[in-house]
Amino acid sequence: MCTVTWLWESERFTLLFNRDEQRARLPAEPPRIWDVDGHTILAPRDGQAGGTWLAANRQGLVVCLLNYYEREPGSASRQGEAPESRGLLVLEAATGSNLAALTESLAERSLSRMRPFHLLAFDTRASRGRYWLWDGDEVQVAEIDDALCPVTTSSYASQAVVAYRRALFHAWRDRAGGALSVDALERYHHSRHQEADAYSVFMSRTDAQTVSVTRVEVVRDEVRMVYQPRPPEAQDALSFSAVLALTPSEAQG
């Protein structure tokens, strides 16, 4: 139950992520700097399982994960094993120095105890992204291109909700002449369908809602996360921001 979009610009990479969760789930912590096995990571923290859905590191790698509901509950449940946290996989993936390192580590890692997911990783210094789809049986890997955007999921009426949100995005992009600005993406991520709010990008149901909108911006020397939580029934909430300095690239010396 989430939506992610992204935008490449000459001097900036921007990613927006709506996190949708059960109303009963414990609230998350705003983004902060973590030490993960000696690696410096910027990420919010899930209040229930302790992992995250979105992370960035000092090499400019941005990683995010969405649940894949078409194949829930996945192989872990079929085998009768306790599932491994997908949120901890995001932290693990964010320790990679680049896409090649992350791809190698994921190829060697067992996912058999994880429920299905979409994992997206963006190497902002190389202006490239890669996408993994784990369906509980096998992994599909592809390069990220504009046709993939947006990636969105829903535990309710999955196919219909995904089709609605993607059609809305494409309609907005067509009206903008084929390219959306960061401001337009922000409006998309806060859009509501009052007559069918479960379909909205900024969604609300009796059992679940969009609990936060996070914007990630990567520029030449830093990555910034701006995190807006949504208290129940609130339209406007306080924002929290955190910054992580990037290590100098080889081009910078």
Image: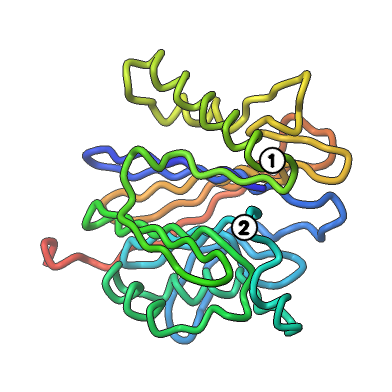
Q: Is residue 166 above or below residue 71?
A: above
Q: Residue at x 44, y 51 (%)?
A: 224
Total labels: the figure holds 2
Circle 1 SS class: loop
User: In this picture, is 115 found above or below 119?
Assistant: below
Q: Decide which of 230, 130 is in the foreground and name it.
A: 130
- In this view, the residue farthest toward the top is 175
Instruction: Judge from the rendering whether residue 10 lies leftward or rightward of residue 36; answer left or right.
Output: left
Classify 10 Å Cα crowding around label 1: few (below 14), some (14-19), many (20 and above): few
Relative to 248, is 253 on the left or the right?
A: left
The tag on residue 67 is 2
Q: Earlier in the sequence, mark 1 or mark 2?
A: 2
Vertical arrangement, residue 82 with respect to residue 7, above or below: below
Q: CA distance from mark 1 to mark 2?
A: 26 Å
* Residue 238: numbered disc: 1
Q: Which mark is residue 26?
A: none
Q: Nearer the viewer, mark 1 or mark 2?
A: 2
Q: Position of residue 117 (x, y in %)?
A: 56, 62
Q: Residue at x 29, y 69 (%)?
A: 98
User: Which residue: 48% across, 71% down?
Assistant: 138
Task: Say which amino acid is labelled 1.
Answer: Leu
Residue 215: percent from left, percent from top: 51, 44
The residue at the point 60 percent across, 47 percent down is 227
